[in-house]
């Protein structure tokens, strides 16, 4: 009986010492700024599969797409919020955060985190599947790695595309 306890205890110690490290999470991004999650495989509880199938263009030919965020005035004109989202056309699970008012989970002002996956830039239109919102960087990293469920979004440089109470439009492609 004592021997079994030692063996069990030894195995338990090995599991604890090798398997319970907290994941390293990058710094949190500011209001409506993008964090390119290049550490998705390291930070997610279940790593995203990166088999290259999600690439939409030849390696190294990706574009940086700056999407402006606008409000619509009562007279129908659009006002630049001076906020933008910056995407890479080849990276999956790009995340950003925004400050939001209190909600049923947290009544105080706090951050919501979203992610873009299934990204594509073709013929002047940038498309993605938007995942979230979640209440932490770690949660959005995990959900993005595990799920393809989300809202399909697309923007171009000629139209203002409504996204809830905001409007989005491509400002620049590099």
Image: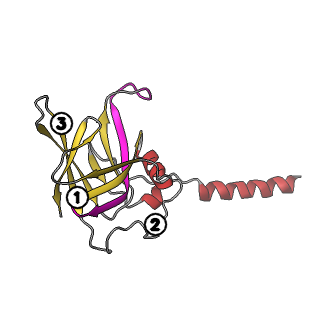
Q: Earlier in the sequence, mark 1 or mark 2?
A: 2
Residue pictured at 31% horizontal, 71% vertical: 57
**Most prominent secondary structure in the magenta stretch?**
strand
Residue 149 higher or lower than 56, as above or below: above
Residue range (magenta): 104-124
Element type at mark 3? strand
Task: Answer with the quarter of the image where residue 81 lies.
Answer: top left
- Dot 3, crowdedness within 10 Å: few (<14), some or many (≥20)? some
Give the total of numbered labels.
3
Task: Answer with the quarter of the image where residue 80 lies.
Answer: top left
The residue under label 1 is: 65
Element type at mark 1? strand
The residue under label 2 is: 50
Element type at mark 2? loop
Q: Closer to the observer: label 2 or label 3?
A: 3
Residue pictured at 47% horizontal, 70% vertical: 51
**Mark 2 touches mark 3? (CB < 8 Å):** no
Q: Residue furthest right?
A: 1
In depth, the one of 135 and 56 nearer the eye is: 56
In depth, the one of 43 and 48 nearer the eye is: 48
- Dot 2, crowdedness within 10 Å: few (<14), some or many (≥20)? few
Q: Earlier in the sequence, mark 1 or mark 3?
A: 1
Query: Which label number is shown at residue 71?
Result: 3
Q: Is residue 121 magenta?
A: yes
């Amino acid at each position: 009986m004592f021997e079994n306890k030692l063996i069990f205890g030894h195995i338990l110690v090995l599991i604890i010492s090798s398997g319970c490290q907290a994941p390293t999470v990058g710094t949190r991004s500011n209001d409506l700024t993008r964090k390119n999650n290049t550490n998705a495989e390291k930070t997610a509880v279940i790593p995203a599969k990166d088999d290259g199938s999600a690439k939409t263009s030849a390696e190294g030919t990706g574009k940086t797409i700056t999407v402006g965020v606008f409000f619509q005035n009562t007279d129908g004109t659009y006002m630049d919020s001076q906020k933008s989202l910056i995407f890479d056309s080849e990276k999956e699970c790009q995340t950003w955060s925004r400050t939001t008012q209190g909600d049923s989970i947290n009544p105080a002002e706090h951050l919501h985190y979203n992610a873009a996956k299934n990204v594509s830039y073709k013929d002047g239109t940038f498309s993605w599947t938007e995942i979230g919102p979640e209440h932490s960087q770690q949660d959005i990293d995990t959900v993005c790695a595990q799920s393809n469920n989300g809202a399909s979004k697309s923007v171009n440089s000629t139209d203002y595309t409504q996204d809830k109470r905001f409007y989005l439009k491509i400002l620049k492609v590099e």
